[in-house]
Amino acid sequence: MLAETVARLDADRTATAAAGPATSAGASDGREYGPGEHTVRAVRCAFSELALSFTLFGHHRFEQALRALPAHTALNDLPPDCPEPDRALPGHTESCPHCREFLRLNPAYACLPQRRARLLQDTVDLAVRARLALARAALTGGDGGLERAYEEWAEAIAVSGRAAMTVRTKMAVLRMVLGRADALSDEDSVRRGSCLDEAISIVERALPLLGPPGRQPLSAKLSELLAVRGVWGGYGCAEYDIRPDMVRAEADLRRALELNPESVYARDNLVRVLVFGLDPRPGTGSRVHKLTVLLEAFRLLHGGLERLPTHARYWETLGDALEDLESLLLGGLSSQRLLDHLVQVPDEVERAQGDAAARARELLEEARRLRDAQGDTAGALHLLARATRAHPSNADVRLELLRTTEQRLNELCEPGA
Ligand SMILES: [Zn+2]
């Protein structure tokens, strides 16, 4: 009677699941199960070898639940069962020792199609959910939690392979990892740095474990976390009287951008760390060093503007980098040339207010002449800085700025420069 009821509920549920994805069976952590599935599974487990384990699981005694699970094999190694047509014959169960034993131990499964496989799937599902619950508790449980969580994740993935549920389990681990990382990165206090450290460790640990299904979302998350930690370590921490660490901030932002070259946040903040870090760092005051850093900043911004030519953040940061370039160039001028330069400024401001795109092209031509005909690279850079500011989305101007900065750098590096 029980066996037939379970089988009927199962058939109803299968029909409902086929009708729409919203009610189909989902994650191992139970969140995506509709109430129908939850109830039917509870009945199956209660009237089977899974009963004790299921009860312990319900009382959050996850380790005991795991120990109470019946021994189980893999889907491919299941021993042959009596064929379903034979099982349906009147009087078969009473006369067949095998079916009699199955009915005694697992009455809820006796009439299900593929009953052994279904029992195995529920066993594995229970093991996976217990492992994931232990992992979740470990993640929030303080010291050494990540290692314990990792062991549980690895066990959950290994056991789920027996019932062909590996991808589903990896997705459940992925959700847990991303959820925990988000919760940690929401921390907004003096502990923000250590919370970000922890979030990054969790994602880094999960990356090799989850393989291809987790790679893209985890890499994106890692990039995001590294960029956030870079900004925190470079500036944010100062709000809490923590001394900024520009070297570490730069390393974080570089890695963030490597993982996700599309990240505007990582790219823009890397340039900011580079440019704003120009002066305060000890032993880095030389013009060659400054120009090297600015060249990298221009390259990064050029890469960003190739992707998003009118992005306001890039324009703003480019403006700051151009100012640094100009003050570096002015620092190398004689008093007379400095005066000549300053005299031109109001005129230039006026002309740039007209057709900015046309003015940028004029300046570009003038800069090329100055550089190629007169060998005045520094003068050409002045003009290119103005041209870039007048029209930041002109890729030709930016490329010429890059080439000329490189050339100027080579000149400064030549012996006797
Ligand atoms: Zn039989």
Image: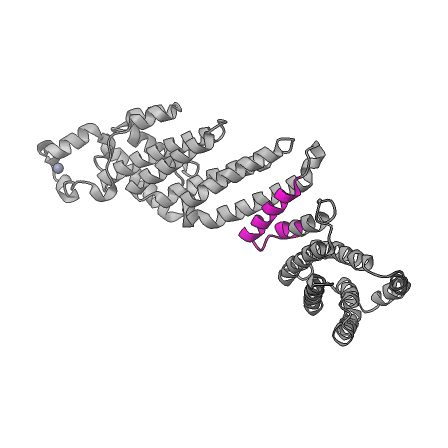
* Image coords of residue 250 (percent x, y): 63, 47
Compared across the picture, whether 207 is left or right of 97 comes to: right
Tell me, yes or no, if residue 35 can be seen here: no
The colour scheme of the drawn protein is: one colour
* Image coords of residue 35 (percent x, y): 40, 35
Quarter of the figure that contains the N terminus = top left
Main secondary structure of the magenta stretch: helix
* Image coords of residue 66 (percent x, y): 32, 28
**Viewer-nearest residue: 373 or 93:** 373
| Bounds of the magenta segment | 245-269
| 140 falls in the magenta region | no
Report the residue at 76% width, 58% height from top.
325
* Extreme residue in the front direction: 416
Report the residue at 86% width, 65% height from top.
348
Report the residue at 15% width, 43% height from top.
83
**Viewer-nearest residue: 376 or 298:** 376
Compared across the picture, whether 140 is left or right of 231 comes to: left
* Extreme residue in the bottom direction: 373
Q: Quadrant of residue 16?
A: top left
- The answer to whether residue 25 is above or below residue 66 is below
Quarter of the figure that contains the C terminus = bottom right
Tell me, yes or no, if residue 190 can be seen here: yes
* Image coords of residue 15 (percent x, y): 33, 45
- The answer to whether residue 212 is above or below residue 35 is below
Q: Quadrant of ligand 1?
A: top left
